[in-house]
Image (cartoon, rainbow, N blue to C red):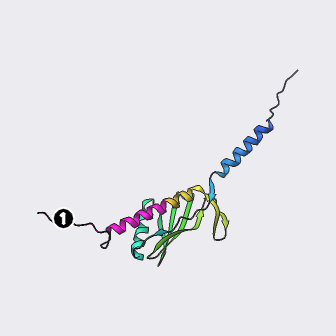
Amino acid sequence: MSSHRRSVVHPAMLVVIVAAALLLSGCRSQPLLTPPLIPSSMEAEQNRQAILRGMAAHHWLLVGEVPGRLTAKLDRAGKHIAIVDIRYDDRSIAIAYKSSTGLRCEPEGAGCSSIHRAYNRWVAQLAKDIEYGVQMVRIESPNGPSVAAPPPAE
């Protein structure tokens, strides 16, 4: 008499396994987020310099330029590539999705309805780096913040 055991997966366990698989597969994609406008009251050329400084902080490359717009690319070993347009004038700076490779973009109109969460992280960091660039250019500008002169010695 041979006794063979059958592997039976309890239906409740099967539901848990399927739910976990769906949850884990969906964790990497999120709705595509567009960072808020970065306010700046500097001249457009100063904002351009601030953007370039911000891009350099995390190795974004300048791949295109027309007046008022820079196109930046972040390439992670050719597997994951993000390209954004950065528009600027003398009032603000705006970052917008342009294209991507390997980031699971679910197309919707000119952009994506969802994308790999890394894209949102990279672009949020780029916005912070540009904000920092704006602060630094403002400080370094000849018309930047003035520091009160010390009182004369008596």
Residue at (52% x, 61% y) in the render: 123
Q: Position of residue 132 (x, y in %)?
A: 41, 62
Q: Position of residue 11 (x, y in %)?
A: 80, 38
In the depicted view, which residue is nearer to us: 150 or 87?
A: 150
Location of residue 114 by image quarter: bottom right
Q: Is residue 150 magenta?
A: no
Residue at (56% x, 65% y) in the render: 34
The number of discs equals: 1
Residue reaching furthest to the top: 1
Q: Which residue is mark 1?
A: 151
Which quarter shows the N terminus? top right
Query: What predominant SS class does the magenta segment belong to?
Result: helix
Residue type for callout 1: Pro
Q: Position of residue 23 (x, y in %)?
A: 68, 48
Residue at (56% x, 59% y) in the render: 120
Is the residue 17 above or below the residue 154 in the image? Answer: above
Is the residue 2 above or below the residue 93 in the image? Answer: above
Location of residue 130 by image quarter: bottom left
- Tell me if 42 is positioned left or right of 66 in this view: left
Residue reaching furthest to the right: 1
Residue reaching furthest to the left: 154
Q: Is residue 129 magenta?
A: yes
Which quarter shows the C terminus? bottom left
Q: Which residues are magenta?
A: 125-148
Secondary structure, mark 1, is: loop
In the depicted view, which residue is nearer to us: 75 or 115?
A: 115
Q: Residues within 10 Å of mark 1 (few under 14, many from 20)?
A: few
Residue reaching furthest to the bottom: 67
Residue at (51% x, 65% y) in the render: 73
Q: Position of residue 27 (x, y in %)?
A: 63, 51
